[in-house]
Protein backbone atom coordinates (compact mmCIF):
# COMPACT_ATOMS: atom_id res chain seq x y z
CA UNK A 1 0.00 0.00 0.00
CA UNK A 2 1.34 3.43 -1.01
CA UNK A 3 1.76 5.82 1.92
CA UNK A 4 0.39 9.33 1.66
CA UNK A 5 2.90 12.18 1.45
CA UNK A 6 2.77 14.33 4.58
CA UNK A 7 4.45 17.66 3.84
CA UNK A 8 6.76 19.45 6.25
CA UNK A 9 5.44 22.98 6.62
CA UNK A 10 6.91 26.14 8.13
CA UNK A 11 4.53 28.92 9.14
CA UNK A 12 5.77 32.41 9.95
CA UNK A 13 2.91 33.91 11.89
CA UNK A 14 2.36 37.45 13.12
CA UNK A 15 1.35 37.40 16.78
CA UNK A 16 -1.24 40.09 16.09
CA UNK A 17 -2.87 38.23 13.21
CA UNK A 18 -3.60 34.91 14.95
CA UNK A 19 -4.00 34.28 18.67
CA UNK A 20 -2.21 31.10 19.85
CA UNK A 21 -1.35 29.74 16.38
CA UNK A 22 0.62 26.81 17.82
CA UNK A 23 -2.45 25.62 19.73
CA UNK A 24 -4.61 25.97 16.63
CA UNK A 25 -2.13 23.97 14.57
CA UNK A 26 -2.41 21.17 17.14
CA UNK A 27 -5.99 20.67 15.92
CA UNK A 28 -4.80 19.77 12.39
CA UNK A 29 -3.78 16.36 11.10
CA UNK A 30 -0.05 15.71 11.59
CA UNK A 31 0.81 18.81 13.64
CA UNK A 32 4.25 17.27 14.20
CA UNK A 33 5.05 18.14 10.57
CA UNK A 34 4.22 21.82 11.03
CA UNK A 35 6.57 24.31 12.64
CA UNK A 36 5.20 27.69 13.65
CA UNK A 37 7.50 30.66 14.14
CA UNK A 38 5.72 33.55 15.82
CA UNK A 39 6.84 37.06 14.91
CA UNK A 40 5.81 40.49 16.21
CA UNK A 41 5.00 41.37 12.58
CA UNK A 42 5.48 39.62 9.22
CA UNK A 43 7.65 42.59 8.23
CA UNK A 44 10.32 40.80 10.31
CA UNK A 45 10.25 37.78 8.01
CA UNK A 46 13.32 37.93 5.78
CA UNK A 47 13.30 36.12 2.44
CA UNK A 48 16.54 34.36 3.32
CA UNK A 49 14.88 32.52 6.28
CA UNK A 50 12.33 30.93 3.99
CA UNK A 51 14.82 30.16 1.24
CA UNK A 52 17.12 28.49 3.78
CA UNK A 53 14.19 26.38 4.95
CA UNK A 54 13.59 25.21 1.38
CA UNK A 55 17.28 24.48 0.98
CA UNK A 56 17.04 22.30 4.11
CA UNK A 57 14.10 20.39 2.65
CA UNK A 58 10.95 22.02 3.97
CA UNK A 59 8.05 21.37 1.57
CA UNK A 60 6.08 24.59 2.04
CA UNK A 61 6.30 27.98 3.72
CA UNK A 62 3.31 30.02 4.72
CA UNK A 63 3.49 33.63 5.94
CA UNK A 64 0.49 34.72 8.00
CA UNK A 65 0.04 38.41 8.60
CA UNK A 66 -2.59 40.91 9.60
CA UNK A 67 -5.17 42.04 7.11
CA UNK A 68 -4.33 44.92 4.82
CA UNK A 69 -4.59 48.20 6.72
CA UNK A 70 -4.40 46.42 10.11
CA UNK A 71 -0.64 45.88 10.49
CA UNK A 72 0.52 47.34 13.81
CA UNK A 73 3.69 48.48 12.09
CA UNK A 74 1.79 50.09 9.21
CA UNK A 75 3.30 48.30 6.22
CA UNK A 76 4.97 45.18 7.60
CA UNK A 77 2.39 42.93 5.99
CA UNK A 78 2.78 44.72 2.66
CA UNK A 79 6.56 44.24 2.79
CA UNK A 80 6.01 40.57 3.62
CA UNK A 81 3.63 40.21 0.66
CA UNK A 82 6.31 41.64 -1.66
CA UNK A 83 8.87 39.20 -0.26
CA UNK A 84 6.50 36.29 -0.75
CA UNK A 85 6.00 37.41 -4.34
CA UNK A 86 9.80 37.52 -4.84
CA UNK A 87 10.08 34.04 -3.34
CA UNK A 88 7.44 32.73 -5.74
CA UNK A 89 9.55 34.01 -8.64
CA UNK A 90 12.69 32.36 -7.22
CA UNK A 91 10.93 29.05 -6.50
CA UNK A 92 9.54 29.02 -10.03
CA UNK A 93 13.03 29.66 -11.45
CA UNK A 94 14.35 26.76 -9.37
CA UNK A 95 11.52 24.53 -10.62
CA UNK A 96 10.25 24.01 -7.09
CA UNK A 97 6.87 25.56 -7.84
CA UNK A 98 5.59 28.96 -6.76
CA UNK A 99 2.72 27.43 -4.81
CA UNK A 100 5.09 26.16 -2.13
CA UNK A 101 4.99 29.61 -0.58
CA UNK A 102 1.94 31.66 0.29
CA UNK A 103 0.92 34.79 2.15
CA UNK A 104 -2.29 34.74 4.15
CA UNK A 105 -3.91 37.71 5.83
CA UNK A 106 -5.91 36.83 8.91
CA UNK A 107 -8.08 38.45 11.53
CA UNK A 108 -7.21 37.37 15.08
CA UNK A 109 -10.90 37.00 15.91
CA UNK A 110 -11.43 34.33 13.24
CA UNK A 111 -9.39 31.31 14.31
CA UNK A 112 -11.41 28.98 12.09
CA UNK A 113 -10.27 30.95 9.00
CA UNK A 114 -6.65 30.37 9.97
CA UNK A 115 -7.28 26.66 10.46
CA UNK A 116 -9.07 26.33 7.12
CA UNK A 117 -6.46 28.42 5.24
CA UNK A 118 -3.68 26.31 6.75
CA UNK A 119 -5.46 23.10 5.71
CA UNK A 120 -5.92 24.46 2.18
CA UNK A 121 -2.25 25.43 1.94
CA UNK A 122 -1.06 22.06 3.23
CA UNK A 123 -3.35 20.33 0.72
CA UNK A 124 -1.82 22.33 -2.12
CA UNK A 125 1.71 21.43 -1.04
CA UNK A 126 0.65 17.80 -0.72
CA UNK A 127 -0.42 17.85 -4.39
CA UNK A 128 2.99 19.32 -5.37
CA UNK A 129 4.78 16.46 -3.63
CA UNK A 130 8.07 16.51 -1.73
CA UNK A 131 10.53 19.37 -2.12
CA UNK A 132 12.92 18.15 -4.84
CA UNK A 133 15.86 19.60 -2.88
CA UNK A 134 15.08 17.32 0.07
CA UNK A 135 17.33 14.46 -0.92
CA UNK A 136 20.07 16.42 -2.67
CA UNK A 137 23.43 16.62 -0.92
FE1 LIG B 1 0.69 41.81 11.98
FE2 LIG B 1 2.39 43.57 10.97
S1 LIG B 1 1.57 43.55 12.96
S2 LIG B 1 1.57 41.79 10.02
Image: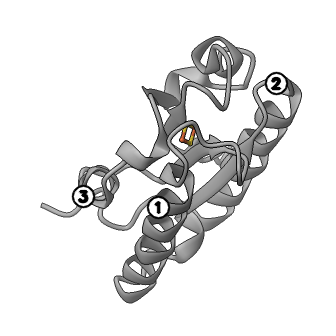
- Determine the image quadrant of residue 6: top right
Q: Earlier in the sequence, mark 1 or mark 3?
A: 3
> Which of 18 and 93 lies nearest the eye of the viewer?
18
* Left or right relative to 128: residue 131: left
Circle 3 crowding by C-alpha within 10 Å: few under 14, some 14–19, many from 20: few
How far apart, in angstroms, are the residues tagged by discs 1 and 2? 24 Å
Q: Quadrant of ligand 1?
A: top right
Q: In this rendering, does residue 10 appear at all?
A: no
Q: Residue at x 36, y 43 (%)?
A: 44
Q: Residue at x 60, y 66 (%)?
A: 128
Q: Position of residue 10 (x, y in %)?
A: 46, 40
Q: Position of residue 16 (x, y in %)?
A: 61, 27
* Left or right relative to 46: residue 2: right
Q: Is mark 3 within 8 Å of ligand 1?
A: no
Nearest to viewer (mark 1 / mark 2): 1
Q: Which residue is mark 1?
A: 79
Mark 1 vs 2: CB contact within 8 A:
no
Q: Which residue is mark 3?
A: 48
Q: Is mark 1 within 8 Å of ligand 1?
A: no
How far apart, in angstroms, are the residues tagged by discs 2 and 3? 28 Å
Q: Is residue 33 above or below residue 61?
A: above
Q: Which residue is mark 2?
A: 111
Amino acid sequence: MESKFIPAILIFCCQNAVASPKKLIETLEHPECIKVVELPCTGKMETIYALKAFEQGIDGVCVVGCREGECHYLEGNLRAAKRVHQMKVILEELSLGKNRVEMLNEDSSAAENFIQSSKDFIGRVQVLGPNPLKHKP
